[in-house]
Amino acid sequence: MKMTPFALAALALSLALPLAVCGHAHAAALSPTEQKIVDAVKAHAPQGLQLLERSVNINSGTMNHDGVREVGKLFREQFDQLGFATRWIDMPPAVRRAGHLVATREGKRGKRLLLIGHLDTVFEKDSPVQLWKREGDRVRGQGVNDMKGGDVVIIEALRALHKAGALDDTTITVMFTGDEEDAGEPIDISRADMVAAAKRSHIALAFEGTVRDKDGKDTGTIGRRASSSWELEVKGRQGHTSGIFSEKAGYGAVYEAARILDGFRQQVIEPDLTFSPGLILGGTDVDVDAVGDKGQASGKTNVISRVATVRGDLRYLSYEQRDRARARMRAIVDQNLPGTSASIVFHDAYPPMAPTAGNIAVLKAYSQASKDAGLGEIPALPPGQRGAGDIQFIAPLIDSLDGLGVSGNGAHSPDEDLEIASVERATIRTALLLYRLTR
């Protein structure tokens, strides 16, 4: 049956009414203090957006130490205004990173919380990517959603609690790292203060941008895959190509590297596990720089390749999964073609954040706060859809939840942006969650 425009409008209204009623019902679930907190978030939203603009207009690529410190100074002023004790933690020169901002409050009420953000972006000082640019209801710019938007959510949520008198006697530590995009080494030093803060806390909340699910809902991150790396070195017998494939000459290093990589592709497969060769060089001679992300190779078409090297990453959700994958990869590496040899070395970096009952419980509380504010439920994001982040260094120690930040697209690209409305949405959810956890 064809419906008239009037009938379509009536149907749309009938479908919308339950949503509106539902929204009022959720709002009624807020206590008078919680409603004051929500009102405070909304009242200060324009100033929060201005703070975000100021931070985005400061380049703070990980290796632009002055820029990282400048953003830290900007945010430090906000925490000082809210009655936090603040300090800047410098890293030793050998770590080659700017340091971290820490803000703390000490009290005796409720859960002790650790809130995590980061000051740096992937866009270094010479980046051609624009700074702040507003386009209607969205904003583009360096680090606008990864993760200066999340930093502002933390500050504005705490500001709303302060205005409602709800910060008194709470224990909250905020840590904004200066090197999340490229953590300084050794990790034992660059993340020592974060680990120490986690050991003094009950729950950790991190504010990387939220990821929308297939239904368009904001999600929460209860698990994140580890990030590690591997180095494959292959050797062959240099000689004239007219003899390749023979018992005497063998197959050469490049063919052996190709066999190994294809073996990984076909045989090391299971859910939430990925591995990617990001750099490969082969020929008569190969040279890779000290960092491992640049190199050069030389060779001739009539010479069998003598050497090949491959650099890649490996991402996994548990140490058991890591060990299975590495065992399979080593077995493939050991099945050498005639006239070749190969070896592989693995390096750990970010540990896995495994989904736990405790993490799920924190997500449930966050989702309830969102529903009570009329902002809908927050489902869990499948862990395989998320890369590595700072929270993984402390997730094995305490219950943790990530992805509480803003909603945007194109992180790490020239098109990085955020949905402006998501700043207020995330701030309301966060402020209510913090209030409830610290009662």
Image (cartoon, grey):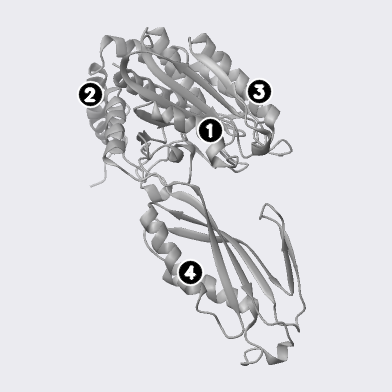
Q: Nearer the viewer, mark 1 or mark 4?
A: 4
- Where in the figure is residue 228, as x and y percent of width and height? 51, 53
Secondary-structure class at tag 1: helix
> What residue is shown with label 1?
147
> What residue is shown with label 2?
21
Identify the amino acid type marked 4.
Answer: Arg
In the picture, residue 434 is in which quadrant? top left
> What residue is shown with label 3?
70
* Residue 330: numbered disc: 4
- Where in the figure is residue 423, as x and y percent of width and height? 46, 26
Identify the amino acid type marked 3.
Answer: Glu
Secondary-structure class at tag 2: helix
Secondary-structure class at tag 4: helix
CA neighbours of label 3 inside 10 A, class few (<14), some (14 to 19), many (20+): some
Mark 4 vs 2, N-terminal side: 2
Q: What's the distance in space between the residues labelled 1 and 2, CA to CA?
A: 34 Å
Q: What's the distance in space between the residues labelled 1 and 4, CA to CA?
A: 37 Å
Picture layout, residue 69 above or below residue 415: above
Q: Nearer the viewer, mark 3 or mark 1?
A: 3
Mark 4 vs 3, N-terminal side: 3
Along the line of sight, the residue nearer the viewer: 256 or 159: 256
